[in-house]
Image (tube, helix red, strand yellow):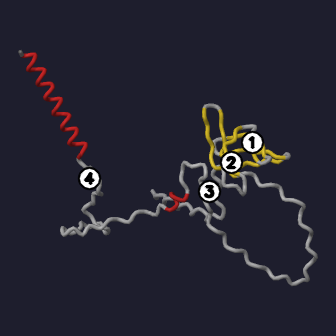
Amino acid sequence: MTRKIAGLAIAAMMAGLVLVNVALYNTPVDITPIASGKGRDGALASAAGSLQFPEAGDFSETFQRPLFTPTRRKIVPPPAAPQPVEVAVAPAEQPTPPPEAAPAAAPSLLGISRNGGAAKALLRVAGSDAAVWYGNGETVDGWKVSAIDKDQAVLERDGKVARILLYPPWKNLPPPPPPPPPPPVPEL
């Protein structure tokens, strides 16, 4: 008899847990933001409910350049100031003929992937929107991938070597601030 009662008690508890789970499943989750008790100026907000939320940051750069897509756009450096135009005083000489053909630009490096011992570089040819992964020894637009390091790829073409940095240094950076003066030496 006690076994039957114990079995019924266990079955009743299981049925109760199932009912609690169903009730929790059907209850909507409140996802409204929680406001702090402080306003923008750092002082406590009034009790009348005039909470002011801080403005969200500008995420336009994040949405324009998604992090994990092969078509990620490069960082566009700030435009350089135009060079002043010089006026020629002497009569102009005959212009020299332009060179026959400029050498093709090396592809741009968008990413590097290492899987075990093999490394691949995500390269995009100039004038193309598509990027493709290339390994050591493969050829892209006439350039042969000769080495891939953690932050650069080395390409060779017709005896020329091009090192393409994954993170190229910024040009026209402002000079670094001067170091702080040394602390005064106490006199004894």
Q: Secondary structure at mark 2?
A: strand
Measured in 3D between alpha carbons, the distance from the residue under mark 4 to the one under mark 1, in whole angstroms, is: 54 Å
Residue nearest the observer in this picture, 4 or 76: 4
Disc 1: which residue: 145
Query: Which corner quadrant holds the N terminus?
Result: top left
For image coordinates 61% across by 37% down, the residue present is: 114
Q: Is residue 167 above or below residue 21?
A: below
Which element is circle 1 on?
A: strand
126 sits left or right of 8 in the view:
right
Q: Earlier in the sequence, mark 1 or mark 2?
A: 2
Is 87 in front, or is 9? Answer: 9
Residue 38's quadrant in the figure?
bottom left
Instruction: State how far apart marks 3 and 4 are (Cα).
Output: 40 Å
Kindly identify which residue carries mark 4: 30
Q: Is residue 117 above or below residue 141?
A: above
**Sequence-first disc among 3 and 2:** 3
**CB atoms of marks 1 and 2 within 8 Å:** yes
Residue 74: which numbered mark, if any?
A: 3
Q: Nearer the viewer, residue 25 or 78?
A: 25
Is the residue marked by circle 2 packed among few (<14), some (14-19), or many (20+) residues within 10 Å? many
User: Given the image, on which type of amino acid does mark 2 rest?
Assistant: Leu
Q: Amino acid at mark 4?
A: Asp
Q: Residue furthest bottom?
A: 89
Q: State which mark lies toward you, 4 or 1.
A: 4
Tell me which amino acid carries mark 1. Val
Q: Which residue is mark 2?
A: 123
Q: Quadrant of the C terminus?
A: bottom left
